[in-house]
Image: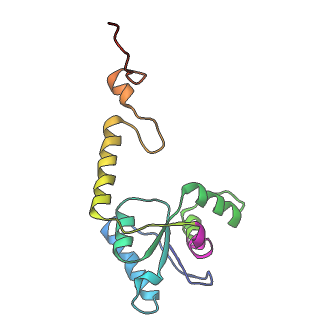
Amino acid sequence: MCLQDAAGRVLAARRLTEGVAGIARLHELVAGHMDGDDPAQVVLAIETDRGPWLRALVAAGYRVLAVNPKQAARHREVVAVSGKKDDTFDAAALADMARTRRHQLRAVAAGSDEAEAVKVAAGHIRSWCGSGPGTRCGCARRWGSTSRPRWRPTRS
């Protein structure tokens, strides 16, 4: 995690643990550097559009930007040409994206209960048929067919 001010100065950089303890530590760090009590003044970029971290950040009232991994990779190339993969640098690059390219990133909206139910159902369907995001349905493997069943008229 990398926390920057509006000018790009690093205010805090930490490796956070998974789970509730890591999320609580992030809230502490952010609260220590906020001006006022409005959580909407905090803009965060995260390289995923689902999961407990995302739900916790949105529920806290932060402005959360979902970053496509390809966008993040292109931004890392712009910031540094070395090409090395480093978690500390990746966090700083995401913070820089939130600061400089906010207008190009998709803001995550707080989902309704119905929207969350659809996401859960879609996840269950993908896990059942063996497909994931960006892959073809695995039902053919499960049912032994390589093509969709087609309707054919019967002869009279």
**Residue 7 at x, y percent in the picture:** 62, 84
Number of numbered discs present?
A: 0
**On the image, which quarter does residue 75 sit in?**
bottom right
**Among all residues in the image, which is located at the extreme right?**
81
**Residue at the image position 61 percent from the left and 71 percent from the top:** 101
Depth check, front residue: 128 or 121 = 121
Using the image, determine if residue 21 lies above or below residue 49. below
**Residue 14 at x, y percent in the picture:** 48, 73
**Residue at the image position 49 percent from the left and 77 percent from the top:** 43
Magenta-span inclusion, residue 138: no
Using the image, determine if residue 32 lies above or below residue 22. below
Residue 126 in sight in this render: yes
**Among all residues in the image, which is located at the extreme front?**
156
**Residue 156 at x, y percent in the picture:** 32, 6
**Residue at the image position 53 percent from the left and 62 percent from the top:** 67
**On the image, which quarter does residue 116 sit in?**
bottom left
The secondary structure that most of the magenta stretch takes on is helix
**Among all residues in the image, which is located at the extreme top?**
156
What segment is highlighted magenta in the picture? Answer: 95-104
**Residue at the image position 70 percent from the left and 59 percent from the top:** 82
